[in-house]
Image (cartoon, rainbow, N blue to C red):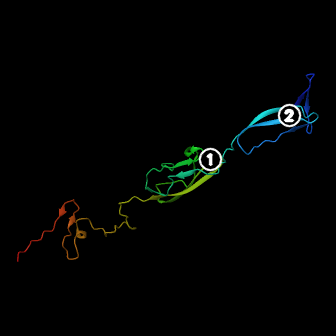
Amino acid sequence: MVVTATMSDGTTAELGEGEYTVSEFDSSTAGEKTITVTYAADTSLTATFKVTVKEAEPVDTVPPVISGADDVAVEFGASFDPMAGVKAVDDVDGDVTGAVKVSGDTVDTSKPGAYTLVYTVSDAAGNEASVTRVATAKEKSGETPVEPGGKDPDGGKEPGKDGDKDDQGNKKPGLSATGAVSVAVRRRRDI
């Protein structure tokens, strides 16, 4: 603070430390406060000014929350967007999804396996949140794996052949290779 004294002849002089006093004020409560500056050489010479004490801004210590980054299974060959369904929200800054950084493995759905991804985001106050997610690429379902050597698990039998018969050589009910339905009919005996 700079205090300047204006003399009766219109001249001014900057007062140094010890040449004036400043009244104290209560800064623990909000509101307008009056400050009095007194000239030390003549305490009848004073000046006043007002200051406004404001409530302290709350300090942001809460990190954002990342949601939607749960572990996920991805079909073989399907496209994978690591940000699909992921959202980050901060209690002060609001939606910070655009600031989310994804690191870790690159998910290659053409290769079955588990891929680890790390999602990180910070708010304006520097509070950081991090979530780890595992994306598992699975093989195509519904296909019968072929055993090494080119043999299929049914021993090379064609559908509708011996594989459709039970241990006694009787045809099993169900769908044949052509899609027709076999139905076993029993006659009812009247006794």
Q: Quadrant of residue 175?
A: bottom left
Residue 78 x, y percent position in the rendering:
43, 52
Report the residue that reaches farthest toward the left. 191
Q: Quadrant of the C terminus?
A: bottom left
Q: Amino acid at mark 2?
A: Val
The residue under the point 35% across, 63% down is 144
Is residue 58 or residue 154 the one in the foreground? 58
Report the residue that reaches farthest toward the top. 9
Residue 104 x, y percent position in the rendering:
57, 55
Q: Residues within 10 Å of mark 1 (few under 14, many from 20)?
A: many
Is residue 153 or residue 179 the one in the foreground? 179
Say whether residue 128 is left or right of residue 189. right
Label whose residue precedes the other's in the sequence (2 or 1): 2
Residue 127 x, y percent position in the rendering:
64, 50
Closer to the eye: label 2 or 1: 2
Vertical arrangement, residue 66 with respect to residue 163, above or below: above
For mark 2, give the secondary structure: loop
Q: Amino acid at mark 1?
A: Asp
Q: CA distance from mark 2 to mark 1?
A: 39 Å
Q: Quadrant of the N terminus?
A: top right
Q: Residues within 10 Å of mark 2 (few under 14, many from 20)?
A: few
**Residue to which mark 2 is pinned:** 2
For mark 1, give the secondary structure: loop
Is residue 127 or residue 71 the one in the foreground? 127
The residue under the point 23% across, 69% down is 164
Say whether residue 146 is left or right of residue 20. left
Vertical arrangement, residue 175 with respect to residue 16, above or below: below
Count of labels in the image: 2
**Residue to which mark 1 is pinned:** 123
